[in-house]
Image (cartoon, helix red, strand yellow):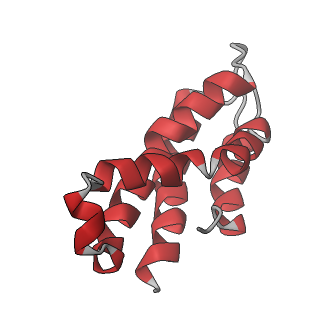
């Protein structure tokens, strides 16, 4: 399974440029990056990998959502690293601009296969 691409740092750079007085923790950013980038990316990646599912696995009850959860969990360290690099003062306006870019970078890894 692949890690998030280093090009996702482009989005992080946008986030780290902005600044406001309110402070957010790395855990807050981790949760947000997980919700807006990693989980949606892994949902699509799991759906794109349907060609790799064998009938036996499906008969055992393994579902796309299970695969997406496993893929998301396997990227915890990379997600935490990315969230840890975000500036605590980054406003929502900067983060909301960065997340679609980060999602596109993540999806590109699976669309090129």
Judged from this view, the residue extending furthest toward the top is: 22
In the displayed structure image, the side of residue 15 where residue 39 appears, left or right: left
Judged from this view, the residue extending furthest toward the bottom is: 113
Quarter of the figure with the N terminus: bottom right
In the image, 113 versus 94, the foreground residue is 113
Residue 61: x %, y % from top left: 24, 51
- The structure residue drawn at horizontal position 52% and vertical position 48%, both measured from the top left corner, is 72
Residue 33: x %, y % from top left: 56, 39
100 above or below 24? below
Quick check: can you spot residue 17?
A: no
27 above or below 65? above
All told, the count of numbered labels is 0
In the image, 47 versus 103, the foreground residue is 47
Q: Quadrant of residue 20?
A: top right
57 above or below 48? above
- The structure residue drawn at horizontal position 53% and vertical position 29%, both measured from the top left corner, is 92
109 above or below 77? below
- The structure residue drawn at horizontal position 29% and vertical position 75%, both measured from the top left corner, is 54
- The structure residue drawn at horizontal position 63% and vertical position 23%, both measured from the top left corner, is 28
Residue 43: x %, y % from top left: 35, 54
In the image, 3 versus 97, the foreground residue is 3
Quick check: can you spot residue 73?
A: yes
Residue 53: x %, y % from top left: 31, 72
């Amino acid at each position: 399974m692949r890690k998030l691409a280093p090009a996702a740092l482009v989005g992080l750079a946008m986030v780290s440029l902005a600044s406001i007085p309110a402070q957010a923790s790395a855990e807050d950013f981790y949760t947000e990056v997980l919700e807006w980038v990693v989980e949606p990316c892994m949902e699509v990646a799991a759906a794109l990998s349907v060609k790799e599912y064998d009938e036996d696995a499906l008969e055992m009850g393994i579902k796309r959502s299970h695969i997406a959860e496993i893929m998301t969990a396997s990227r915890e360290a990379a997600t935490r690293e990315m969230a840890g690099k975000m500036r605590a003062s980054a406003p929502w306006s900067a983060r909301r601009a960065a997340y679609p870019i980060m999602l596109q970078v993540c999806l590109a890894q699976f669309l090129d296969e």
